[in-house]
Every structure is written in structure tokens, then in C-alpha cells.
């Protein structure tokens, strides 16, 4: 497209988002608005924001890669499980919102539930994940700009980082969600047009017959039930479904921002929007496979821009470019907003106490965090770490937190000790399995496989619990564990990434359960409402105060609430 | 697998994307309308 064309599109994109951000800016921004936009966002903006945030540049590249590598089943085993990460968290989201209607971060709620160590564990993992995600999006931006113009990679990441920081800095989360709407319109609009145009330009249905005749596809790549695609792509993602949703502050932030009665439609719409867009991008990889396209420089990440450049006219190539810039910018601004909220609420707000926290100081801290985070991500981006490997690692790490976090919202007996010890024990088992510090052979392999088999039951049990309650969860967990027994041994040892994640789930569940089941703790969930809440009104939450000053009963428990 | 099934498989996703886009745009328009009616900022 050339430097002028790329610069014009970038100016149009970042100029437009900057204009929107200025339009909604307030002379006196509030700390709560900066973090959660007042907890009453409508369906249109929140569904757009959830969709835009969850679709990032890497998800489009990775889905196309999955289609190219594993054939027709590949994009499903990438996009479907990613979509379910949003869907499976919404029942838990409703419960989290019910016990902490005015919280800003999940870690803040853990502080109210357990105390400082649990809060910092969750906040630390959130920060790590957001910085890695931010870095990855800068890298994707630099790479696409360098590919489509004579501008260097360094200039590309500087433009993207500067553009995102400028429009997010002043209004924080409010700017992030509003610009997400425009970005999602650009992304989804481009996906709806670009995919069929590439399909027909590449020869339509005939490409499949021709590709088969030329031997470009294997029987596995032509099968919707490819075991290769499932074991190498799908299964590790299924294990990560809940982990990403719990560990990612960008989701929690939108959960606390959307109007409470709109949580379900928002999350369901985002599930379908994410799934269709990302699996659709994967179809470009499937087409490349049938066409026998060789990735530029042997790098499969080049497939998507390569196919776009080959088959799209200039105008639509510009649209595809905006689709990728929109996807990475919407996730990057969400990461900045997430990081600032964690530092504002968890590092500063709750450490000095909600009543003593100064909202102006909080805002200053939030903005400074965004600047520092951008600088750190730029440094990592230029160091060219293998970001996707890091992200997969962090995703599995989050698996250690899933059961203790979810159990803490339902089970009154879970203590800070149970939470902390179970997460650390899971981490201690996860690391040697994931990185194969000890060879997966002999007694060690049998132990790991036994735990991984339990992990299968834990993952599916937690998923069932969200929708159907405790009894169904126990049945699903037991049946899944028993069903995995016959083939799990002498098999899972060959899949260290998958086994590592499953072991993390199993150990955190077993330790947390063992330390809690005989506990005499009887936590009052109403405490969370009193500890979390608005910062701008000096920590006075009128709703909580009303409850405290009257004999109004505590909210009734949900069907899932344990005792 | 027939070319017809593969064609439908490739083209169904942009159709779904378009459907979600319509739902989000309509939702956004409703948010704007409600905010104006109540005299408060959209966000």
C-alpha cells in the first residue's frame, strides 16, 4: 500500500478514536468512571466492547494458522473454545456481580473475601497477562505495518503504542469501551466482506476439487473430526477455557461495568461474535491450504496478510488492514485500562482503605500506570520474546487459580490459607510437568497422569457447575474422570502442555477442598459489598449504608451457593 | 467431502458475523436513544 497509504489509514483510525475520546472527556474525570464507567453500560456498547476486546490480532493469525495446519477442523478447535471462554464465565459473572455489585477488579473482591495474599496473587497474574497481551498486540501492529509499507517494525510499534496510549490516557475505561464500538463495526464489517471476496477471487468451490486433485490436503486435514486438530489445538484450549476468563482482568472489568440485567445477552452476543469472526478468519487459512499457498518467509503468521494482498483490491486491502489494526488496538486499550484499574484499586485503593483513598491521586496513578505499561510493553516488543509461548504459559498458570477463585464466591468455608496454599501447591506441580523438568516416565508419569485424569473431571465439573449447580457438577466431574481412566494412563504423558494445565486444576481443587471441607469458617458474603465499592463518594455506598441502617434482610442465596 | 459442503462451511461465518454486527449496531442505537431520553451521557 506504500507509506502514504498506510499512514493515511493509521491517521484516519487513530485520529477518529482520539476524536471520540476527546468528545466524551470530562474536565473532572472520576476514578470510578475511569475504571468501570459507573457500572451501568447498555447492551450495545458492552457487547461491542466484549467482542472487540476478546478478538485480538493474534487470534486472527492463529486461527488462519490452525486452518492451514490442521485443515477444516483447525479453526473450530481454535475459535470455538476461545468463544466458550466468554460463554462459560457468564453464570459465574452473575454471581460475582451479585456479591460485589460495585467492585472494579476480581482481585479487589478476593481482598474482601480473603485478604492481601489472595488479592496479590490474582492481581499479579492479571498484570502479567495484560502486559504480555499488550506486548503481543504492539508486535502484531509493528509487523503488519512493516509488511504492508516501507516503514520499519520499530516505527510500526511506536505508532501503534502512541496511538493507543493517546486515546486511552485521559478517559481510561470509558474511552476504551466507546472506541471499541467503532472498532468492532470496522472489524466485523471487514470480516463479513473480506472472507467471501477472497473465497470467490480464489476460485470459489473449484479450489477444493483442485486442491484435492493436487494433493494439497491430507485425509486428516479434510476431516471435521481430526484427532490431530483436537489433541494439538483443541484439548489444551478446552483446559484453558475457564482459566483465561478468570485470569483476564479485561473480562472482569466489563463484567463490573455492564448493567447487571444485561450480563447474559452481552456475553452470549460476544460469544457468537468472537466465534464467527475468528473461525471466519481461519477459513482464509483453510483456503490457503487447498490452494497450496506457501507462507512468505516460511512464517505461517504471514498467511492472513499474504492472502489479503494476493486476492483483495486495494480498497478492500485497506479495509482488511483496518480490521487487524482495530483488533489489536481494541485489545491493547483494554489491557491499558485493566492494568490501570488493578494498580488504582488493588495496589493503591485497597491498601490505604476505600474511605481514605483520594480519587484524584487514584486518577494520577491510573494514568501513570498506562504510560509505564506502554513503555514496558514497547521494551518487550523490541526484545522480540516469543510472546505466544509466554501467553500460553500464563494461561496455564491461571488454571491454578480457577477453582480457588470460583469456590470463594460460593463456598463459605474457603479460607485465605486454603486459597493461598492450593494455588502455590498447584503451581509447584504445574511447573515441572509443563516444562518437563522431570522426565515424564515411570512412577512420576503415572502420578501426573492420575492427577491429569482428575483434572479432566475438575474442568468439566466447574463448567457444569456454572450452568446447572453443584449436584450436576459432581456427577459430570465423576463421570468425566471415570470415562478418562481407561485411556488416560500411558497416553497423557505425551502431551505435556495439556497435562500441565490439567494437573494445575486437579491439585488446586484437591488441596483447596481438603483444607476447606473441615473448616469452621462461615464467611458472610455481605462483607464483600461493604469492602468493595465506589471510591469517588469517599467510600460511602448508599445502597450498603441503607442495608446497614435498616433491618433489610441480606439478599437470598442463589441455587449454587454452598454452605 | 463435497465442494458444496465446504463452500457452505466457509461462507456461513461471514453471515453469522453480519448478524452479530446488526444486533450490536441496533443495541448501540437503543443505548443512544435511552441516554438522550434520560438526559445523561452515553458513557
Image (tube, coloured by chain):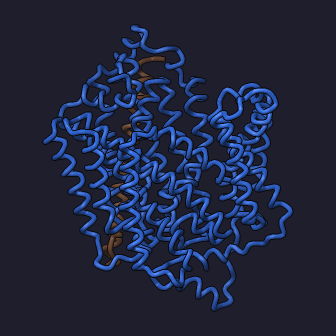
Chain colours: A blue, B brown
Residue A290 appears in view: yes
> What residue is shown at x 60% (from left), y 77% (from top)?
A531
Q: Residue at the far bottom: name it.
A: A549
Q: Residue at the far left: name it.
A: A4
Give the quarter of the figure containing the C terminus of chain A. bottom right
* Vertical relation: A431 (above or below) A411: above
Of A131 and A101, the residue lying toward us: A131
The spot of residue A327 in percent (x, y) is 35, 46
Q: Quadrant of residue B24?
A: bottom left
The spot of residue A477 in percent (x, y) is 75, 44
Of A292 and A432, the residue lying toward us: A432
Give the quarter of the figure containing the N terminus of chain A. top left
In the rendered structure, the answer to whether residue A75 lies left or right of residue A92 reads: left
Q: How many marks?
A: 0
> What residue is shown at x 41% (from left), y 65% (from top)?
A42
* Vertical relation: A392 (above or below) A443: below
The spot of residue A268 in percent (x, y) is 50, 52
Residue A467 appears in view: no
Of B30 and A372, the residue lying toward us: A372
* Vertical relation: A320 (above or below) B1: below
The spot of residue A166 in percent (x, y) is 28, 61
Q: Quadrant of residue A490?
A: top right
> What residue is shown at x 40% (from left), y 58% (from top)?
A373
Amino acid at each position: 500500500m506504500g507509506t502514504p497509504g498506510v499512514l493515511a489509514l493509521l491517521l484516519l483510525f487513530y485520529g477518529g478514536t482520539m476524536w471520540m475520546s476527546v468528545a466524551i472527556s470530562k474536565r473532572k474525570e472520576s476514578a470510578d468512571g475511569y475504571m468501570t464507567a459507573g457500572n451501568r453500560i447498555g447492551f450495545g456498547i458492552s457487547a461491542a466492547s466484549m467482542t472487540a476486546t476478546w478478538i485480538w490480532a493474534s487470534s486472527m493469525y492463529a486461527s488462519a494458522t490452525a486452518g492451514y495446519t490442521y485443515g477444516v477442523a483447525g479453526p473450530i478447535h481454535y475459535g470455538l473454545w476461545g468463544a466458550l471462554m466468554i460463554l462459560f464465565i457468564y453464570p459465574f459473572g452473575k454471581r460475582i456481580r451479585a456479591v460485589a455489585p460495585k467492585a472494579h477488579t476480581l482481585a479487589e473482591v478476593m481482598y474482601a473475601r480473603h485478604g492481601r495474599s489472595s488479592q496479590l496473587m490474582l492481581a499479579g497474574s492479571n498484570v502479567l497477562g495484560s502486559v504480555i497481551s499488550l506486548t503481543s498486540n504492539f508486535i502484531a501492529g509493528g509487523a503488519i505495518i512493516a509488511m504492508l509499507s516501507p516503514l520499519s517494525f520499530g516505527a510500526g510499534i511506536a505508532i501503534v503504542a502512541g496511538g493507543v496510549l493517546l486515546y486511552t490516557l485521559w478517559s481510561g475505561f470509558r474511552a476504551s469501551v466507546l472506541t471499541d464500538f467503532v472498532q468492532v463495526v470496522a472489524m466485523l464489517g471487514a470480516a463479513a466482506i473480506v472472507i467471501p471476496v477472497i473465497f470467490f477471487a480464489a476460485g470459489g468451490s473449484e479450489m477444493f476439487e483442485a486442491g484435492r486433485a493436487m494433493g494439497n490436503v491430507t485425509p486428516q486435514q479434510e476431516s471435521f473430526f481430526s484427532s490431530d486438530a483436537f489433541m494439538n489445538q483443541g484439548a489444551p484450549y478446552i483446559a484453558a477455557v475457564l482459566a483465561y476468563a478468570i485470569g483476564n482482568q479485561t473480562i472482569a472489568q466489563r463484567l463490573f461495568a455492564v448493567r447487571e440485567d444485561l450480563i447474559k445477552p452481552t456475553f452470549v452476543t460476544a460469544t457468537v461474535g468472537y466465534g464467527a469472526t475468528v473461525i471466519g478468519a481461519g477459513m482464509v487459512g483453510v483456503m490457503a491450504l487447498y490452494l497450496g499457498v506457501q507462507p512468505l518467509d516460511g512464517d505461517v503468521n504471514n498467511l492472513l496478510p499474504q492472502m489479503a494482498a494476493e486476492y483483495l483490491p486495494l480498497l478492500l486491502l485497506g479495509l482488511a488492514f483496518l480490521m487487524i489494526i482495530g483488533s489489536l488496538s481494541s485489545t491493547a486499550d483494554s489491557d491499558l485500562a485493566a492494568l490501570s484499574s488493578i494498580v488504582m484499586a488493588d495496589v493503591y485503593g485497597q491498601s490505604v482503605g476505600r474511605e481514605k483513598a483520594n480519587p484524584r491521586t487514584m486518577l494520577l496513578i491510573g494514568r501513570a500506570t498506562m504510560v509505564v505499561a506502554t513503555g514496558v510493553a514497547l521494551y518487550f516488543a523490541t526484545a522480540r520474546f516469543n510472546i505466544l509461548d509466554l501467553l500460553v504459559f500464563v494461561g496455564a498458570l491461571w488454571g491454578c487459580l480457577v477453582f480457588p477463585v470460583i469456590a470463594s464466591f460460593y463456598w463459605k468455608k474457603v479460607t485465605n490459607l486454603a486459597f493461598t496454599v492450593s494455588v502455590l501447591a498447584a503451581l509447584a506441580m504445574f511447573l515441572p510437568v509443563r516444562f518437563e523438568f522431570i522426565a515424564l516416565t515411570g512412577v512420576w508419569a503415572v502420578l501426573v497422569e492420575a492427577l491429569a485424569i482428575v483434572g479432566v473431571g475438575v474442568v468439566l465439573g466447574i463448567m457444569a457447575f456454572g450452568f446447572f449447580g453443584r449436584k450436576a457438577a459432581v456427577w459430570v466431574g465423576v463421570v468425566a474422570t471415570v470415562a478418562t481412566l481407561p485411556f488416560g494412563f500411558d497416553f497423557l504423558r505425551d502431551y505435556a502442555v495439556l497435562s500441565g494445565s490439567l494437573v494445575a486444576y486437579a491439585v488446586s481443587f484437591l488441596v483447596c477442598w481438603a483444607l476447606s471441607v473441615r473448616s469452621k469458617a462461615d464467611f458472610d458474603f455481605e462483607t464483600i459489598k461493604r469492602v468493595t465499592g465506589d471510591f469517588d463518594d469517599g467510600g460511602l455506598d448508599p445502597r450498603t449504608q441503607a442495608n446497614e441502617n435498616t433491618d433489610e434482610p441480606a439478599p437470598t442465596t442463589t441455587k449454587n451457593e454452598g454452605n | 467431502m463435497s465442494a458444496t459442503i465446504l463452500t457452505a462451511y466457509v461462507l456461513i461465518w461471514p453471515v453469522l458475523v453480519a448478524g452479530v454486527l446488526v444486533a450490536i449496531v441496533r443495541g448501540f442505537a437503543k443505548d443512544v436513544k435511552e441516554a438522550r431520553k434520560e438526559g445523561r451521557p452515553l458513557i
